[in-house]
Image: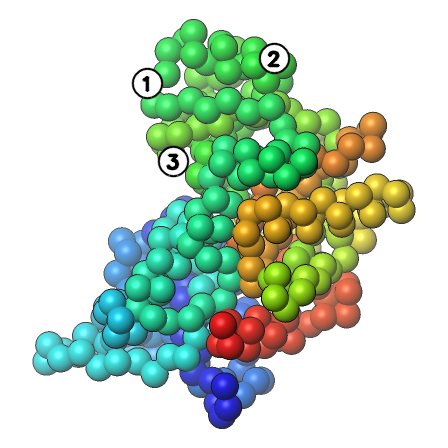
Amino acid sequence: MEGTLHVAVLFGGTSSEHDISLRSANNVLHELSGLEYDLTLVGITRDGEWLNYTGVLDDVDEGDAWTAHDVCPVVVVPGGGLCRHEANGTLTRLDVDVALPVLHGQGGEDGVTQALLESAGVPYVGCGVLSSAVCMDKDVSHRLAASAGVRVPKCEVLYRGASAADVEAAVSACGGYPVFVKPTRGGSSYGVSKVADENEMARALELAFSLDPKVSVEEAIVGTEVGCAVIGDATSGLEMGVVDETVVSDGGFFHIHQDQTAGASASSQNSSLRCPAQISDEDMALVRKTGFAVYEALCCSGFARVDLFVTPEHEVVFNEVNSIPGLTRYSRFPEMMKASGRELSGVLDQLIRLAAKN
């Protein structure tokens, strides 16, 4: 596609990760500002309203301040693109060649937004509808990864209203306590609890069920958590950044994205990051092989972050995939790509141009 590309950047959203999306978008917009793109900003409120935002870039991550001014409602028209709903009731089509969703969690990263964009005939960066939905569902993603020969944690699913016997059976199937309790289709680590015994289970289930009617009970894997930043697809080829490692200081787990300090070097108060990961060459080779295998098994495209564990027995175990990883200036994905010599601006440029061609 020749000439200046018109790129719609989508941010905000209805999930619990709304604020993180705003911070990611603010960084993305500054990274793109030096490139030859015509940018259209589409903010999504916590209630799900789409708004064409024309304010200054630095206001994007100021809570919901951007919704109070310089906005016009946007509607998705099947086969007709994205349109401004003008005050006089008319629809004006936005000039968009490709969309860049900078959204996290349910409603933005789970295939819903991707399906809307496809219905409107708007190409977009990142994983498709199927892959986005699969990556968001920890139960389904584990099953697919296992079918590709990747080791996954033992996992059982519970639904709201599960009996005490159901809970006991799930824990037993996972090898007993400790276990992790997670919203099956939750993003980040919101609603995730490490449960040491049955006395802690009721609260953990209450928290997880408040975010998702489907909850996963998972075997607690002992090992080092590592991340793989992957870009590309089956046609263009795949590329991986430098593998990183999370170091947890309190014996708990990595509470990614739950900080409120945008300048933090890691995304939590209980953890730090190492890039590159301090693992053996043999383990590193297996991690990279497994990261690519998971990416392909879950039909990922564009970009994603694949999270894995390396056990003391040198086994690599799948954890989860973030199909739209955090893109703040302190997030893991940009740091892993930067360590491999790739600045975020260059990565985004590559992804946008790849999406525009497809």
Q: Is residue 31 above or below residue 268?
A: below
Residue at the spot of label 2: 176
What percent of the width, then of the height, locates residue 179? 59, 21
The reply, left or right, for residue 137 in relation to residue 284 is left
Kind of residue at badge 3: Leu
How far, Cα to Cα, is label 2 from label 3?
24 Å
Q: Between disc 2 and disc 1, whose residue precedes?
A: 1
- The mark nearer the N terminus, 2 or 3, is 2
* Foreground residue among 28 and 171: 171
Q: Residues within 10 Å of mark 3 (few under 14, many from 20)?
A: many
Circle number at residue 211: 3
Residue 317 location (% of width, % of height): 69, 34
| Residues under numbered marks 2 and 3 in contact, where contact means CB atoms less than 8 Å apart | no
Q: What residue would you read off at disc 1?
A: 161
Q: Image point 41% across, 63% down: which residue?
A: 11
Left-right relation of 16 to 354: left
